Amino acid sequence: MPSPLSERITTANTEALRRIGTAAPVLARVRTAREVVPALGERVLLHAGPPVTVETLCGPMRGAIIGAVMYERWAGDLGEAESLLERGKVELRCTHDSGVVGPMAGIVSGSMPVFEVRDATHGSVAYAPINEGIGAVLRFGANDGGVVTRLRWLEEVLAPALDAALVGAGGLLLVPLMARALTMGDEMHQRNVAATSLLCRAMAPALAATANSGEVMAAALRFLGENDQFFLNVAMAAAKCILNAAHDIPGSTVVTVMSRNGGEFGIRVGGLGDRWFIARAPTPVGLYFPGFVAADANPDMGDSAILEVLGLGGFAMAAAPAVAGFVGLPSAKEAPSVTRRMGEITVGRSTHFKIPALDFDGTPTGIDIRRVVRLEVTPIINTGIAHRRAGVGQIGAGVVRAPLEVFQDALKAFTAQYAAEEASAGP
Amino acid sequence: MPSPLSERITTANTEALRRIGTAAPVLARVRTAREVVPALGERVLLHAGPPVTVETLCGPMRGAIIGAVMYERWAGDLGEAESLLERGKVELRCTHDSGVVGPMAGIVSGSMPVFEVRDATHGSVAYAPINEGIGAVLRFGANDGGVVTRLRWLEEVLAPALDAALVGAGGLLLVPLMARALTMGDEMHQRNVAATSLLCRAMAPALAATANSGEVMAAALRFLGENDQFFLNVAMAAAKCILNAAHDIPGSTVVTVMSRNGGEFGIRVGGLGDRWFIARAPTPVGLYFPGFVAADANPDMGDSAILEVLGLGGFAMAAAPAVAGFVGLPSAKEAPSVTRRMGEITVGRSTHFKIPALDFDGTPTGIDIRRVVRLEVTPIINTGIAHRRAGVGQIGAGVVRAPLEVFQDALKAFTAQYAAEEASAGP
């Protein structure tokens, strides 16, 4: 006789947490996207979040697509690029369906370099593009000449240097580095200064040993030195790689993907395959750069919520009192309460990522759709804010709550699927 | 008519705090000690803390002196080196009298490279030797061949590379870097991983641009990459440089030096010139490396308490919950209480160094001998622990409280000196 469904779920979720806790992601290479994502042929782009159509594309994602078309030289100017898009000549595919995660618009084209993160325990792999810095950058929808020039430099100069260093160093184990950064004030979504500094410090000797020229090396190190969010994309690829191990576990109610396309917010669940559960994306509440206001903000966007799925970002606020203001807390002293609240909707605590201020308690890990629905406590997500118009870029940073409906819909689907399975397996 | 003494003190201490708050230390160069400390002639060494004699030298300082004699090739073997020392053929001088600070034994010889930190605001300068790493190192009294070989490598390889990079970069402003490290879990005495990583990240591009060979550069970056306490000595030189500005202010009761020679604990006070106030050094309470126990510990040693004088180290515990265990706290949540307690004996808060977990309150700065004596609350100092025998090295880390007597003695001297001044200036 089969065990009751609740026991089956407990077993599945425990297994999910065990796999997350035994993953050993390694930053192995910097590859060219089209080498590792065969789908990335001529005029094919990946985008963040659940599937989009040309008709429903939000402004910043539209801007980023146009920028990527220019970068790939599929068009000679912005007007031609936009026309290609409007005429349906650019195929758009989900990042998550190709094992890729991209922050904000998450646009990845074939020529772009991507970090390759491999899980040494479970063998899975995930990819993320290289972080471009802040301000007017592709991922926030900017697409002027400077944006494209920077993307070419990443491809032609930085990526080969980083790849040679990674190969020379035999890859870089990410969990120890990320765990340490969490003891240094990073929650690894809004704040990555510690992880970026540790990455730079870990890779600099290998860069020195493998660089073709001092000039390239100085330029590469300067780029890493000036971008405190450089590690964000590495962390995202690591999170995706780790969570791959928790996906496709029959009976699991653990969330394995949360992602947004600037219009819709979607989740995937470990026991429900690759089906998306989707609702309208909320608009972040946050702090704006001078000259911008809340009315300028695009709804929530990007694959970076994969960090909260792993228990970082908003879930790890207690580790990062310095960014408490971004999540609207009246005092840094309140940051631990956010982490504790998120602990109510997860199946356990991270065995990797521990927070000194909580006496080294692990971060809350494994969002359980049942708990979210029962308690009506939704995941809190730290995020960047893009201007709603194409071509502008980042205008602030803040926080969103995941919409409750996606968890309710997922639980309904879960109950329907597994109740049917139980019934057909009955005596 | 002169103002009453208490008003004079308030004015002087306010000025001390103002100068500390406006200092702008720059890591300018790596120089050779004998170039910048003319006293460092043949068979002259500097040591940490108040003055020592050959007869009263503690074991680890004796070990470090013998190591420095070997390093300088003043003797052919350890026995000969020891004999030189015993026969009074090595002159020993205080680091603080030469504007130098050295951790633990603090032994500095003429050939050693030293960091040069210059205060761009007040023009003062301070020096510290380069941190050698942990374990069997000179500053903890070790002196075998490996220790001397490492010192030679620092002199011949690392120092010229770092100096070229610093000159190339036009120096490195230290307050922003240190302030940032304080938001990343460092209190900068027990824990320097953030500051070291930020230093490495800041200097790596300049190293790349100025290094003579990729090999030297890789070795230099590896050394910085493997030593989380590398920044400690830079922080000490910065603290000394900043506090120079607060020294020699008539009427000030603010402590400008706390230091230990492994036998005695001494302080200097802003309004009392270069006079030492000295008591027996306490022995740290702490955590020991496997195989060592409290009975092996040497009494407190080193100039590194200059960090607590500036408001870092034990005074900044709230910034570093990860090392709460070292100061004997039952929980990381208690760390803020240590910082608050130290706030009771200081004249103000740092305008440079702020702690996110305390909603960006500044660290307690400007230890007032009057408050220490009145409240009987003595400064708490985070510290390394050396084996009491020469030649062994570091055996642990922990915490000491400064002895109350030195503050009582200083206050007596202060009262005597200034009461006499008031009387002679009277109507």
Image (tube, coloured by chain):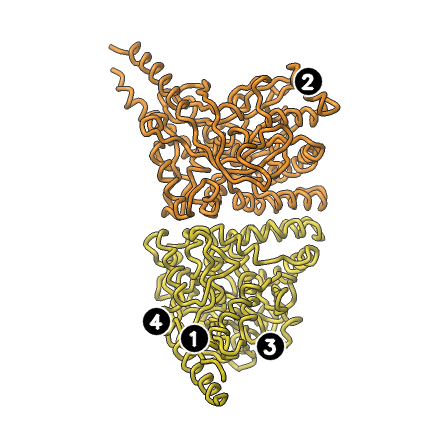
Chain colours: A yellow, B orange
Residue beneath disc 1: A264
**Is residue B197 positioned above or below A80 on the image?**
above
- Determine the residue positioned at 36% across, 23% down: B252
Question: In terms of secondary structure, where does tag 1 sit?
Answer: strand
**Is residue B214 positioned above or below A230 on the image?**
above
Q: Nearer the viewer, mark 1 or mark 4?
A: 4
Q: CA distance from mark 3 to mark 2?
A: 79 Å
> Within 10 angstroms of label 2, few (less than 14), some, or many (20 or more) residues?
some
Residue beneath disc 2: B84
To which chain does the residue with label 3 belong?
A
Q: CA distance from mark 3 to mark 1?
A: 24 Å
Residue beneath disc 3: A43
- Determine the residue positioned at 66% across, 49% down: A205
- Of the residues shown, which amino acid type is indicated by label 1? Glu
Does residue A215 appear left or right of residue A371 in this picture? right
Asked if the residues shown at circle 1 and circle 4 are in contact, with their CB atoms under 8 angstroms apart, the answer is no
- Of the residues shown, which amino acid type is indicated by label 3? Arg
Q: CA distance from mark 4 to mark 2?
A: 77 Å
Q: CA distance from mark 1 to mark 4?
A: 20 Å
Residue beneath disc 4: A376
Asked if labels 2 and 1 share a chain, the reply is no
- Of the residues shown, which amino acid type is indicated by label 4? Glu
- Measuring from the top left, give residue B327's x and y in whole percent: 45, 40
Work out whether residue A311 can be spotted: yes
Mark sitting earlier along the chain (4/3): 3
Which of B407 and A101 lies nearest the eye of the viewer? Answer: B407
Q: Nearer the viewer, mark 4 or mark 3?
A: 4
